Image (spheres, rainbow, N blue to C red):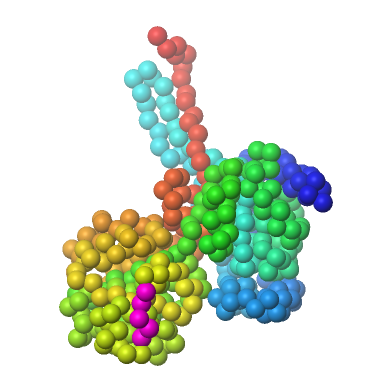
Amino acid sequence: MSSDLTLLMNDIGQRAKNAARQLANADTTTKIIALEAAANAIAKGKKAILAANKLDMERGKKARLSAAFLDRLQLDSNRIDAIVTSLHAIAKLADPVGQVMAQWDVPSGLHIKRVRTPLGVIGVIYESRPNVTADAAALTLMSGNAVILRGGSDSFHSSKAIHTCFIKGLEAAGLPVDCVQIVPTTDRAAVGEMLSGLNGTIDVIVPRGGKGLVARVQRDARVPVFAHLEGICHVYVDKDADLEMAIRLVVNSKMRRTGICGAAETLLVHQDLKDTHLLPILNALSEAGCEIHADSAIHEMLASSVPAKEEDWQTEYLAPIIAVAMVNDIDAAIEHIATYSSSHTEAIITGDLAARDRFFAKVDSAILLHNASTQYADGGEFGMGAEIGISTGKMHARGPVGVEQLTSFKYLVSGNGQCRP
């Protein structure tokens, strides 16, 4: 069986490699046709996609998956409409392939251009989120890359239904259907095969899922990885924060969707707000259904809170729970974030622009926000149409990974007969 799986996966890899060479030279109009046709097929296929998702949800509930996991897995009419909207948005983005990033002349008379090129074949390994099927397919297509999709067994039927619609888009544009392939088995050994690089056919791996999946990919992959291990995101309420704004932003950052990586997991409050802002913010969180894990100073003020332990500052809850600490000043908040953050997303709420600038300069995370919810940590909200993931690394791609981040570059050097002396 393992030998058969290896042959299957290597065949998928080789077909993706061949398709990537054709897709790299596809013109923008052809890619737009494919994306628009795929969006329309998903809109028309909504009933079939919902039926497939119902099967996955039923299996997930029987397997006693967590509420956060089920939330990421579930599709409804509005979420499918959002997928369609996302594909139309990606189709309107500038095609990055061939874009001139910089150009200059050198004393030898040579003219040099640095231009964007596709990465090649991208492997995407993901859990629960069936919308990743469409987002990853669309972003890789627009950036000229072939993609191999390996969704989790929990979203197997939903992902297959979306993939079927996307293939119709490729066919409508006359592009190779092997540009977007989905692994046709739930055998977990397929993940190991992809991490091996499939005989050199995969250029980059992007994991989307829980800490266990991402850790395994980062540990075992023999090809470059764009990934974040977890989203331990912080909101710091500075001493010059507006109370009403702080309440709105903290509640939204935590409670809009608790199961996404941009959800706030830790709240830091300046000590000067102890008698004015602290309890109104915590009461608003409690009323929204959030459990408060508080440091000792705050627990004394809010008896209904749970005393925070060391692990609370290191936990991505993905649930209606938040850890709360009082800090002496902005520098103490920055130090706390430096100690515990996963370098994903942090926000400061303040009316003091000097405090904002200090926070922005001193905090080293992929996304920093001022007076805005951490739930905006999303490629779609950044105007990228969608994202294939959020990278917290510092090499090549950082933050939301969209079409530009899925390209590399090459140098085009033009001369008129120069020989180097």
Which of the 4 image quadrants contains residue 331?
A: bottom left
Q: Which residues are magenta?
A: 305-309
Left or right of 94, for residue 362: left
The residue lying at 46 percent from left, 17 percent from top is: 416
The spot of residue 304 in percent (x, y) is 36, 90
Between 139 and 230, the one nearer to me in the picture: 230
Which of the 4 image quadrants contains residue 332?
A: bottom left
Left or right of 352, for residue 27: right
Any part of residue 84 in sight: no
Any part of residue 80 in sight: yes
Between 286 and 109, the one nearer to me in the picture: 286
The residue lying at 20 percent from left, 80 percent from top is: 273
The residue lying at 19 percent from left, 86 percent from top is: 275
Question: In the rendered picture of this protein, how many numbered marks are placed on residues?
Answer: 0
Instruction: Please identify the dominant SS of the magenta region.
Output: loop
Between 27 and 363, the one nearer to me in the picture: 363
The spot of residue 236 in percent (x, y) is 29, 71
The residue lying at 49 percent from left, 29 percent from top is: 412
**Hey, which residue is sitting farthest top in the picture?**
421
Viewport quadrant of the C terminus: top left
Left or right of 318, for residue 139: right
The spot of residue 167 in percent (x, y) is 73, 57
The spot of residue 208 in percent (x, y) is 56, 60
Residue 306 located within the stretch drawn in magenta: yes
Residue 78 located within the stretch drawn in magenta: no
